[in-house]
Image (cartoon, rainbow, N blue to C red):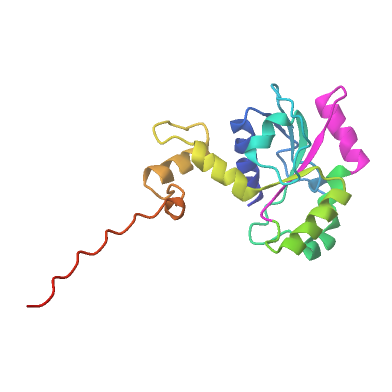
């Protein structure tokens, strides 16, 4: 599952023009090493943003990011609740000084560095969601991108009439779209309802 999750993240950032470098392609012998950075991503053509980036990142905010370290948590059957975060301190290891030193060596030079965590989902309950975000911020994480955001963007961008033979993931999405397994968003709820024609008067019985 880890390899599939990382492939989704790589394809997503490359789709948005980022250069992506994977930390390693082998399985680390120690858990501590395995829990550090998954990707270094670099945007060669960043677009300055006049306002701070939101914590919950969407595709529209990506152009404002120049350099980032990305950690992928593909626990697709779990939510990043406060309890889950409290019992998984290794999640925050990539924001420690040693990880930043590693990132500086990878990128070279000085400059802003965004720390991004890719997660399955944040809690739906508003208060639980607020507490989870507050904890993530307090640990030094700059932004979170849910897998749903990435997958929805990949599905939307893939064209059926193109052959993505160099990417198994994109080719599978293309095939599924071709056979209508992905449908357009249901917008009928937002369309104005048609007015019913007034019923024709019933003539009085003779």
Count the marks. 0
Asked if 165 appears above or below 190 in the picture, the reply is above
> Does the segment drawn in magenta span residue 53?
no
* Left or right of residue 49, residue 195 in this image: left
Query: In which quadrant will I find the C terminus?
Result: bottom left
Asked if 176 appears above or below 112 in the picture, the reply is below
| Relative image position of residue 33 (x, y in whole percent) | 83, 46
Q: What residue is shown at x 82% (from left), y 45% (from top)? A: 141
| Relative image position of residue 7 (x, y in whole percent) | 61, 41
Q: What residue is shown at x 23% (from left), y 64% (from top)? A: 199
> Does the segment drawn in magenta span residue 116?
yes
**Location of residue 88 (image quadrant):** bottom right
**Location of residue 15 (image quadrant):** top right
* Left or right of residue 129, residue 7 in this image: left
Q: Is residue 4 visible in this depiction of the protein?
A: no
Q: Residue furthest left?
A: 206
Range drawn in magenta: 96-121
| Nearer to me, 104 or 34 | 104
Q: Residue furthest bottom?
A: 206
Q: What residue is shown at x 38% (from left), y 48% (from top)? A: 180
Q: What residue is shown at x 60% (from left), y 42% (from top)? A: 8
| Nearer to me, 178 or 82 | 82
| Nearer to me, 53 or 77 | 53
Q: Is residue 5 visible in this depiction of the protein?
A: yes
Q: Residue furthest right?
A: 97
Asked if 194 appears above or below 157 in the picture, the reply is below
**Location of residue 130 (image quadrant):** bottom right
| Relative image position of residue 149 (x, y in whole percent) | 61, 46
């Amino acid at each position: 599952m880890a390899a599939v999750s990382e492939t989704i993240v790589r394809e997503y950032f490359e789709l948005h023009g980022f250069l992506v470098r994977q930390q390693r392609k082998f399985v680390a012998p120690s858990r501590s090493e395995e829990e550090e950075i998954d990707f270094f991503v670099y945007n060669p053509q960043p677009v300055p943003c006049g306002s701070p980036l939101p914590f919950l990142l969407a595709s529209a905010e990506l152009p404002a990011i120049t350099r980032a370290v990305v950690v992928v948590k593909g626990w697709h059957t779990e939510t990043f609740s406060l309890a889950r975060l409290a019992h998984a301190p290794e999640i925050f290891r990539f924001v420690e000084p040693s990880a930043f030193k590693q990132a500086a060596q990878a990128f070279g030079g000085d400059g802003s560095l965004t720390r991004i965590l890719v997660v399955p989902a944040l809690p739906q309950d508003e208060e639980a969601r607020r507490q989870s975000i507050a904890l993530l911020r307090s640990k030094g994480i700059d932004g979170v991108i849910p897998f749903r955001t990435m997958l929805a963007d990949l599905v939307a961008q893939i064209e059926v009439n193109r052959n993505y033979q160099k990417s198994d993931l994109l080719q599978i999405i293309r095939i599924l779209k071709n056979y209508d397994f992905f449908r357009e968003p249901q917008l009928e709820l937002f369309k104005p309802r048609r007015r019913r024609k007034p019923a024709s008067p019933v003539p009085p019985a003779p």
